[in-house]
Amino acid sequence: MRQLAEPRGFSKRAECHVRLGDVDAALEDFRQAITLGGDDPDLHGRIGTLLQTRGDLTGAATHYRQALAGGSRRPEIALSLAWILSTAAEPALRSPSEAVRLAEPVCEDPRMRNGATLDVLAAAYAAAGRFDDAVEAARKGAKLASDAGRTAYASEIEARLDLFENKKTWSEPN
C-alpha cells in the first residue's frame, strides 16, 4: 500500500483503470497523483484525454493547457487541444488562432505528418478562415490516410474537405 502514497502509485493504478474501462476511477487516481505532488504535465494530458472522450471539452481544454504550460512536449496534447479549439460546437471554447499556433509546428515535423495531424491542421485553418490552406491540408491528410489503409478515416477527412471547399467550417456534434 506504500506505493499508493506516492504520485507514481496512483498514476500506475489510474492506467490500470483506463485499460479496464473505468474512467471515473482513472480520473480520481490521476487527480490524486497530482494532489500528492506529481504535477507532471503529462498527467494533465491524460486527464484531458479522458475528459475529452467523455465529452467534457471545457475540462479537457483546461487540462491540455495545464499540460502544455507545465512543459509537456507531447504532440498529441497540442493536437487534441487544437482540435477542441477548432471544432467545438460551443463558441466559447473556440480559439482558431490558438489552434493554428498549436497545430502548425506539429505538422511541420516530417515524422508527425499523417492523415490525423493534417486533419487537425485543416480544421484549424478553416476555423481561422484560411480556407485555401484548409483545403490543401485536408487533401494531403486524406491522401496520407488512404495510403496508410485508413480508408474510412480518409472518407471522413474528404467530407470535411467538401465543407472547406465551400468556405464552411466543421464542428463536432453536440
Image (tube, helix red, strand yellow):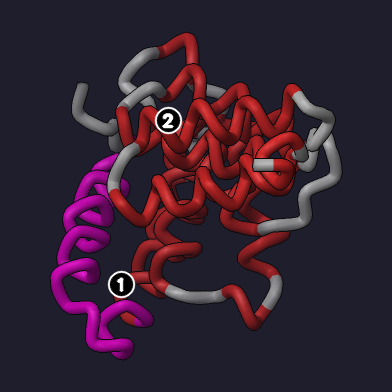
From which residue to which does the magenta span run? 144-169
Locate residue 152, reporting x and y percent: 14, 70
Asked whether the residues under the numbered discs 2 and 1 touch, taking CB atoms below 8 Å apart as contact, a structural biologist would say no
Q: Residues within 10 Å of mark 2 (few under 14, many from 20)?
A: many
Q: Answer with left or right where residue 127 lies relative to residue 166.
A: right
Asked if residue 15 lies left or right of residue 163, the reply is right
- x then y, percent, for residue 17: 40, 46
The residue indicated by pointer 1 is 142
Q: Nearer the viewer, residue 66 or 115?
A: 66
Residue 133 in view (yes/no): yes
Q: Is residue 152 left or right of residue 103?
A: left
In the rendered image, residue 167 lying in the magenta stretch gets the answer yes
Query: From the viewer's perspective, is residue 91 above or below residue 88?
Result: above
User: Which amino acid lies under the numbered mark 2 shown in the image of this protein?
Assistant: Leu
**Which residue in the protein does label 2 denote?**
51
Name the amino acid type tagged 1.
Ala
The residue at 21%/21% (across/down) is 174
